[in-house]
Image (cartoon, helix red, strand yellow):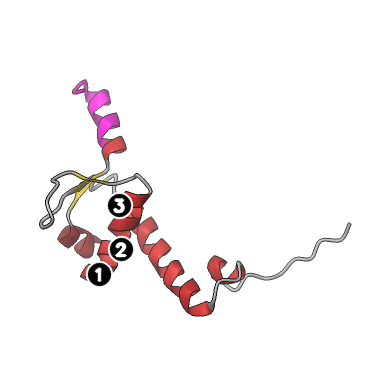
Amino acid sequence: MKVKITRSSGNVFEDLGIPSEEAEYLKIRSTLMIRLLDLLPEHPVVTLPRAMELLKTTKPTAGKAIDALCQAGILAETTGRQRDRVYAYSAYLKVLAEDTGRT
């Protein structure tokens, strides 16, 4: 059986057949989400302004990265407010609390 190998475009979403404009948006969004995820162990509690600072990006873009991590169940909003929200990397904080005996 012969397997056909096709070189990637550099955007997995485009390779999956998603239209170029949407594929580029998804690539950027996923890249920022991964960058924020990588920063969470050092900053397990974040606000939107802090995420903007960490990612060096705009409010809407940082907000989308936070929303994506919330939808994935990685971040959880802790205040219940509409403004000045605080997001926590709960699973990580739980492990830290267990390791220090503060459960």
Can you identify the residue that label 2 sits on? 64
Left of 3 or right of it: where is 102?
left
Label 3 and label 2: CA atoms lie apart by: 16 Å
- Amino acid type assigned to the residue bearing label 1 in the image: Pro
Q: Position of residue 18 (x, y in %)?
A: 55, 71
The furthest residue to the bottom? 21
Q: Along the line of sight, which residue is nearer the eye, 1 or 39?
A: 1
Crowding at mark 2 (Cα within 10 Å: few <14, some 14-19, many 20+): some
Q: Nearer the viewer, mark 3 or mark 1?
A: 1
Q: Which residue is drawn at 36% across and 58% down?
A: 33
Per the image, is 50 magenta?
no
Image quarter where the C terminus lies is top left
- Image quadrant of residue 35? bottom left
Q: Which residue is drawn at 13% across and 56% down?
A: 82
Q: Along the line of sight, which residue is nearer the eye, 8 or 42?
A: 8
Q: Position of residue 94 (x, y in %)?
A: 27, 31
Left of 73 or right of it: where is 102?
left
Q: Is mark 3 on a helix, strand or loop?
A: helix
Can you identify the residue that label 3 sits on? 39
Residue range corresponding to the magenta coloring: 93-103
The answer to whether residue 97 is above or below residue 39 is above
CB atoms of marks 2 and 1 within 8 Å? yes
- Image quadrant of residue 64? bottom left
Q: Nearer the viewer, mark 3 or mark 2?
A: 2
Image quarter where the N terminus lies is bottom right
* Res. 60 mark: 1
The answer to whether residue 103 is above or below residue 85 is above
Q: Residue at x 29, y 46 (%)?
A: 75
